[in-house]
Image: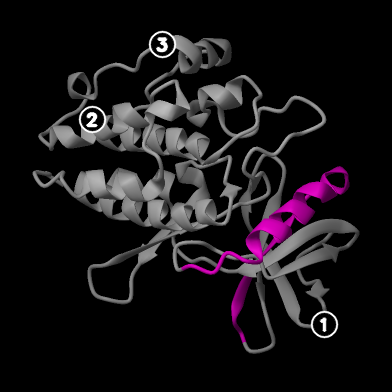
Amino acid sequence: MAIAGTVLLDKYTIVRPIARGASSVVYLAFDLFGTPYAVKLFPNEMASRADREFLVGKDLHHKNLNPVLERITLEGQPGTLMPFAPGQRFSEWVAYHGLKQFLEVFVQVLEGLSVMHEKGLVHRDLKPDNIVVSPGIKPGSLEAKLLDFDLSGPSNEVFRDRLTPGTLAYLSPEAVRGLPLTPAADLYSAGVMLYWGITGQHPFEGEPQEVMRAHLSQPPPDPSSLREGRHSHVLDQVALRLLEKNPANRYPDALSILTALSKATTIEG
């Protein structure tokens, strides 16, 4: 099926694919005034994912969240229309930047995440690939946007079938068990991301079953034994608390993490 060149809703011209995920393809599109947008298309059997992304994303109005504008169908495929978020995926961007810049992005991600949690929503797939980083308006500043809400939904949502939503390296213990997820699951994923930013690797690596068992029962290696350079031990403490197996032992919310991070003053970027 040729998508490029198709006109959506008599207004948006599809130009080319710009990203491919496990279950979707994202296309760049322009409206009649040359404003860029992103069109995300799912296979026909995943229409519910497009519905979910629209229902979650349509009310996410915050500078660090990329909202969803429309639930669309293009050439018979279900999808969503979003503002185009320029920049680079965090997973690629981080290779060229230091810890100080990493934390600047991480803080913005937590700010966006806190808005979702205040609305009673859980992202369920927090990871660097779902974050885009671009230069900010002020010289030298950065702007991060959290994307991809097709796995997101209400806190404690119960599914008919047992599900393990998310990405293996970032799964919380409760996600591994297939339990209903709360914002605490996103905070665990944030802990994996912070650990990765400090050390350059995930706390648990290996074969899938090995990683899942580790999420459930294995303590992560001490970050100080893996990292290069110097930084505040507060960062280690924050990451390890977020990686607690018991959700009740993690920080109570994203804003609490921001308060803890503000104490990490000795950073080499």
Q: Residue furthest bottom?
A: 33
Query: x and y percent of residue 101 in the render?
Result: 25, 53
Query: x and y percent of residue 103 in the render?
Result: 27, 49
Inter-mark Cα distance, 2 to 1: 53 Å
| Comes first in the chain, label 2 or label 3 | 3
At horizontal 39% and vertical 57% (from top left) the residue drawn is 111
Query: x and y percent of residue 3 in the render?
Result: 79, 63
Which residue matches tag 2? 237
Query: x and y percent of residue 16 in the render?
Result: 67, 64
Circle 3: element type: loop
At horizontal 12% and vertical 44% (from top left) the residue drawn is 267
Say which amino acid is labelled 1: Asp
Q: Quadrant of residue 4?
A: bottom right
In the rendered view, would you say 229 is above or below 13?
above
Q: Nearer the viewer, mark 1 or mark 3?
A: 3
| Comes first in the chain, label 2 or label 1 | 1
Q: Which mark is residue 218?
A: 3
Region in magenta? 34-62
